[in-house]
Image (spheres, coloured by chain):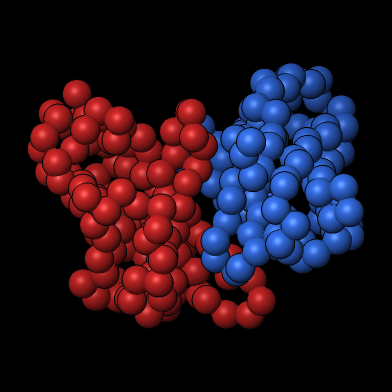
Amino acid sequence: QKEVEQDPGPLSVPEGAIVSLNCTYSNSAFQYFMWYRQYSRKGPELLMYTYSSGNKEDGRFTAQVDKSSKYISLFIRDSQPSDSATYLCAMSARVYDMRFGAGTRLTVKP
Amino acid sequence: DARVTQTPRHKVTEMGQEVTMRCQPILGHNTVFWYRQTMMQGLELLAYFRNRAPLDDSGMPKDRFSAEMPDATLATLKIQPSEPRDSAVYFCASGLGQGAYNEQFFGPGTRLTVL
């Protein structure tokens, strides 16, 4: 079993939909939780960062961490075609040693 | 516009050949990371440098891979000899190494194909 599990999708939604992306993990030592967005043929870029449990909101994006369930989520409101990308969850126990999920490929159709 | 740069962007080589990938971290960043991304394994950390010193290379196959930072503006990842299973996209990332979280900025990657 991988330390970080993420459904690779693909996920296709109409423009304006609410998107929910999720990851589960097994290592209870993880305390840093990140979501990266990766466009095709590009490097990942950081979207959201959360330390320990709780919620964090940034514009149309909301990240949630439930350490008791070892479950993290990313919500995208009012999704746009420009949100079409692969979304990678990542987490670490130390500040540098990130473990990535497989990535979920999202397509937002106009 | 500060960015991590990587060269070459694409590399096709034959099995057994040496491959060298280069990375220029963002000026002022003191942490550098090498990752490998494949469809099967996803994104995996290969090596981590802080102030040019290798702190963790446990993710790297030691017999054929080596990573160095000759100076603060250049990081290299070498594979010798290369094998078809090394085909992947190799990313370099850099960070400031400050605070509780060290945000990593990724380069565009080197797409390696070993025939």
In this rendering, the count of numbered labels is 0
**Residue B86 drawn at (x, y percent):** 29, 35
Residue furthest out toward the front? A1
Residue furthest out toward the left? B17
Q: Is residue A37 visible?
A: no
Looking at the rendering, which quadrant does residue A67 occupy?
bottom right
Q: Quadrant of the C terminus of chain A?
A: top right
Residue B63 higher or lower than B67, as above or below? above
**Residue B42 drawn at (x, y percent):** 51, 37
In the picture, measured across the screen, residue B93 lies left or right of residue B80, that is right
Q: Quadrant of the N terminus of chain A?
A: top right
**Residue A34 drawn at (x, y percent):** 69, 54
Observer-nearest of A35 and B57 = B57
Q: Colour of chain B?
A: red
Q: Is residue A51 visible?
A: yes
In the picture, measured across the screen, residue A73 lies left or right of residue A37, that is right
Residue B67 higher or lower than A47, as above or below? below
Observer-nearest of B42 and A107 = B42
Observer-nearest of A24 and A107 = A24
Residue B37 higher or lower than A32, as above or below? above
Instruction: Tell which chain the image draws in blue.
Output: A
Residue A97 higher or lower than A26, as above or below? below
Residue at image point 15% right, 46% down: B80
**Residue A7 drawn at (x, y percent):** 70, 29
Observer-nearest of B13 and B48 = B48
Residue at image point 37% right, 61% down: B57
In the picture, measured across the screen, residue B83 lies left or right of residue A94, that is left
Residue at image point 21% right, 33% down: B83
